[in-house]
Amino acid sequence: MKISCPTCDETKMLKMIKSTKEISVRNDKITVEVEYYQCIACGEEFLVPQPENDPFVKAYRKYRQKHMLLQPEEIKAFRRKYKLTQGELADLLGLGGATLSRYETGKIQDESHDTLLRLVLNPENLQGLITASPGILSEEKKLKILNVMKESEEPRIDMLERFVIRNFSDYPADELSGFKRFDRDKFLNAILYFCSGDGESKTKLNKLLFYADFQHFKEYTNSITGAQYARVPFGPAPNGYDLYYSILVQRGSIRAEEVEYPGFASHKTGFTGEKYVAREVPDLNIFSPGELRILATVKERFKGFSAKEISGCSHLEKGYTETSTGKIISYAYAKYLKL
């Protein structure tokens, strides 16, 4: 694409400038990177007329990510998969055709409309909606949609996995994620590494992942997996870990076994928990030498520690003591890590 100054038509004396801009989206301040040109000849500053360079398009996308709303291409891809027109899908959902068109072209949807769209992404819900909405679709169209469902039928676990991964991934690479986007493969293989052999209790696994990510941040200023860690009663744990572990169990990547805990302060008589044993060999080639060293160091450091003992250690970490229950622990506390 040939770029020229809109004022003097100069094409050679142009300087690209990169900066940040804060844009208010529904009373939420969103910071985005912007690129624009300055004409050295006349001093004019101008944006390149491309959608991907539009700061408002970028801000809307980041807003949707932050608030876990569907992106326009997700809505469009779903509709096209089942060969539904905008009008047909809008009628099924009780929305106006123009409303759905605006969502697909970039307007931010209402949360209630997003909930409707997410529900209909589930083939079972879509099938029920079609059945319960006579007169909107022809019998021929219904049959075509049902055939598409049958041909592309996916196990429920895959749908759940996509939902969880989206929730893991839809946050910025900032100090709450170790300045890294969630890396699904590294997170999985770190779990397999720690759970190889006799396996580890869920409580201890959470702490091993925490110490590995935070130690790597302490040394290299970024985490290994990009996971966020929340402050929960038994110590730091990957945010949303229960759902993610359940996916790995159902996929067969790890095996869950019952284990008896000797008891924590609030459970002095002990209780039954879960232990995970790897059923797949971890792919260690995806880790850098530094990441592998830290994973091995953490595993060796806490070798022989019970869930209670490693939880006790994590409770003394500054990131844990200075973070409110349920909140995400900032990687900024990694510099205080006692490892």
Image (cartoon, grey):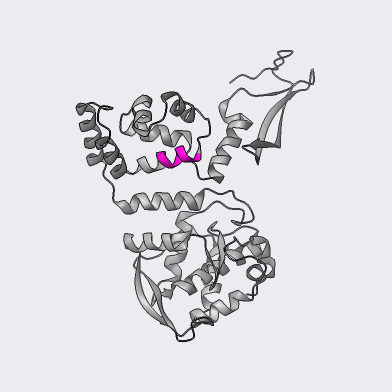
Q: Quadrant of residue 273?
A: bottom left
Relative image position of residue 164 (x, y in whole percent): 43, 53
Residue 18 picture quarter: top right
Q: Quadrant of the C terminus?
A: bottom right
Q: Is residue 170 shown above or below 256?
A: above
Q: Is the magenta stretch mostly helix, strand or loop?
A: helix
Q: Residue at image x 68%, y 61%?
A: 332
Q: Which residue is drawn at 48% across and 58% down?
A: 186
> In this view of the protein, which residue sits in the foreground, 288 or 116?
116
Percent position of residue 263, x then y:
48, 84
Q: Is residue 147 magenta?
A: no
Q: Which residue lies furthest to the top in this view?
A: 8
Q: Can residue 75 be seen in this view?
A: yes
Horizontally, residue 285 falls left or right of residue 294, namely: left
Residue drawn 41% across and 42% down? Answer: 118
Q: Give the position of the N terminus as an image quadrant.
A: top right
Magenta part of the protein: which range?
111-116
**159 displayed left or right of 164:** left
In front: 55, or 67? Answer: 67
Question: Residue 283: in sight, yes or no?
Answer: no
Front-most of residues 76 and 263: 263
Q: How many marks?
A: 0
- Image spot of residue 130 (x, y percent): 27, 35
> Up-down: is 172 above or below 22?
below
Whether 10 is drawn above or below 93: the answer is above
Could you say where residue 45 lies in the image, as x and y percent from the top left? 74, 23
